[in-house]
Amino acid sequence: MYKLDQPPLLFESSRPGRATAILPGSDVPDRPLDAIIPASHRAERAPALPELGELDVVRHYTNLSTLNMSIDANFYPLGSCTMKYNPKRNERLAALPGFSAQHPYQDESTLQGLLALLYELQGMLAEIAGLHAVSLQPAAGAQGELTALLVAAAYFRDRGEKRTQVLIPDSAHGTNPASAHLAGFEAVTIKSNAQGLVDLDDFRAKLGDQPAVFMMTNPNTLGLFDPQIGTIAGLLHERGGLLYLDGANMNAILGVVRPGDMGVDLMHYNPHKTFSGPHGGGGPGAGPIAVRDHLAAYLPAPIVARNDDGSYRLDHDRPKSIGRVRSFFGNTGVLFRAYCYIRSQGPDGLKDIARHAVLNANYLMQLVKDVYPVQYPGRCMHEFVASARTIARERGIRAMDIAKRLIDYNFHSPTVYFPLIVPEAIMVEPTETESRETIEAFARVLRAIAEEDPASLHDAPHTTPISRPDEVKAAKSPVLRWRATPTATS
Ligand SMILES: *Cc1c(COP(=O)(O)O)cnc(C)c1O
């Protein structure tokens, strides 16, 4: 449904001959085109680019940018995504030409600053994990999961063990079973109990003699810390299995608990969540993994190593390595920001992040839980999962209606309908960077929406150019490219 005027595409605003660039004439003697690019390498026609004045282009993009929600403009309580403030300092530092203008094919001797930084980051991530070795290569959390499972598979193969099953709680992020499957394992679902934690009976029943890996998210996606992790680690280790931690959201335990101390053998981080990297619109992330010493040999090569003379090198001499999972050094831009963030916080700052993330989530939960019941009550960690099931039953207002209506109030929607084990789930993660006033304003609006006329909520938002896009069509047949003649699918 179209509401406001749709801004025209640049192609539609194009007028023949309108131009932006004012370039001086070439002072290089003309050479025949064939001498520069052979005809066989040239397209028949020049590409059909839009022709526009500079002001048209500036206005177009500036106006488009105001249609977006962003951390810099809106509260963004998207559960599990940790949309916290991205400090501008980190952006400035990551853009320093000494880092951003490096070329990956440069000689190692000219990359010493970059390598020093990556080496230190490996050390910091190992320390926070309470584990021994780190690979910075994976390009996203999901790739970190896959990489860690490939490391586990290589470890078992090396020991001559045939282990095929990866156990995953039903509250896990969808990437967990996908990664297990891609790594060649069978994904086995473990039920959650009435408290929203791992059902130990189900875990014991499905453990078998030869479990490969248990993938645990702790705190889990319900925002609950599972105190059974020690028992779980013990049961696994007795049978030679490995405990994996999905550490995408480390906010709640950062600097307070080390996964290695809880029995975790391998884990991934999401620097674009926990360590404040920007990650709207599916932009680049990273998924560094940390592992216990007996798994270090299998990490992707190369690893940044330090020479005796204090210089750094890329260590490719790793015969048991699973090989590369990403070109060059990984997404260094994201890794720099994580480095800047960790260094600027320091050990005490990291602990404060955890305390404030937990405080903010609990405060917000208390402000709304009488209207939006929380299925697994008790103290939450960095996020909580409320439910719209009462107002859905009594007033016909669903989680999706609430999520959409929040946009009219300039709030980004929380995550809805996830985790799957909570009906009408509304998963809220305020993050530690929000003020008390923002959290209270959000709670007021959330409560007010529950009182609104259900009929008008079903076609909210009312203030955006498009009210409710067809999400299935947008996901299954997106039209991402302008064509002069629309194709069948568009
Ligand atoms: C975000 C997230 C992931 C996946 O991370 P990506 O960087 O999006 O691939 C995995 N697990 C949990 C719990 C997450 O929140």
Image (cartoon, rainbow, N blue to C red):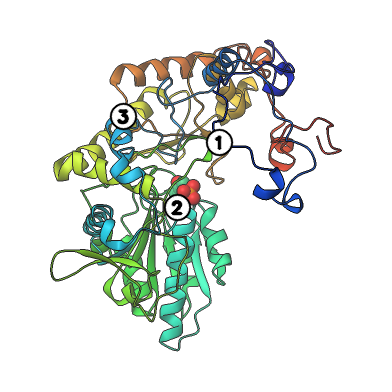
Decide if residue 351 is in sight here. no
Q: Which residue is mark 1?
A: 28
Indicate which label's residue lies in the foreground, 2 or 3. 3
Query: How far apart, in angstroms, are the residues tagged by discs 2 and 3?
Result: 23 Å
Answer left or right for 471 relative to 196. Answer: right
Q: At which x and y percent is residue 148?
A: 42, 66
The answer to which of 283 and 345 lies nearer the viewer is: 283
Residue 221 lies, with reference to residue 298, above or below; the image says above
Task: Say whether disc 1 or disc 3 marks the residue closer to the N-terminus.
Answer: 1
Q: Which of pointers 1 and 2 indicates the residue nearer the eye?
A: 1
Q: Earlier in the sequence, mark 1 or mark 2?
A: 1
Q: Is mark 1 within 8 Å of ligand 1?
A: no
Please, what secondary structure does the residue beneath circle 1 have?
A: loop
Q: Give the labeled residue for mark 3.
A: 88
Question: In the rendered structure, which disc, 2 or 3, sits on the residue that comes first in sequence?
Answer: 3
Residue at 54% across, 13% down: 451
Q: Nearer the viewer, residue 253 or 41?
A: 41
Judging from the image, what secondary structure is the residue with disc 2 in? helix
Q: Which of the image's four quarters has the N terminus? A: top right
* Amino acid tagged 3: Lys
- Disc 1 residue crowd, few under 14, some 14–19, many 20+, Cα 10 Å: few
Query: What is the distance, in whole Å, between disc 1 and disc 2 at their CAs?
Result: 50 Å
For image coordinates 37% across by 50% down, the residue present is 332
* Residue 408 place in picture, x, y as percent: 55, 14
Tell me where residue 23 appears, x and y as whole percent.
55, 23
Tell me: is circle 2 under 8 Å from ligand 1. Answer: yes
Q: Is residue 311 above or below residue 281?
A: below
Q: Quadrant of residue 83?
A: top left
Dot 2 corresponds to which residue?
141
Vertical relation: 68 (above or below) 4? below
- Residue at 69% x, 43% y is 32
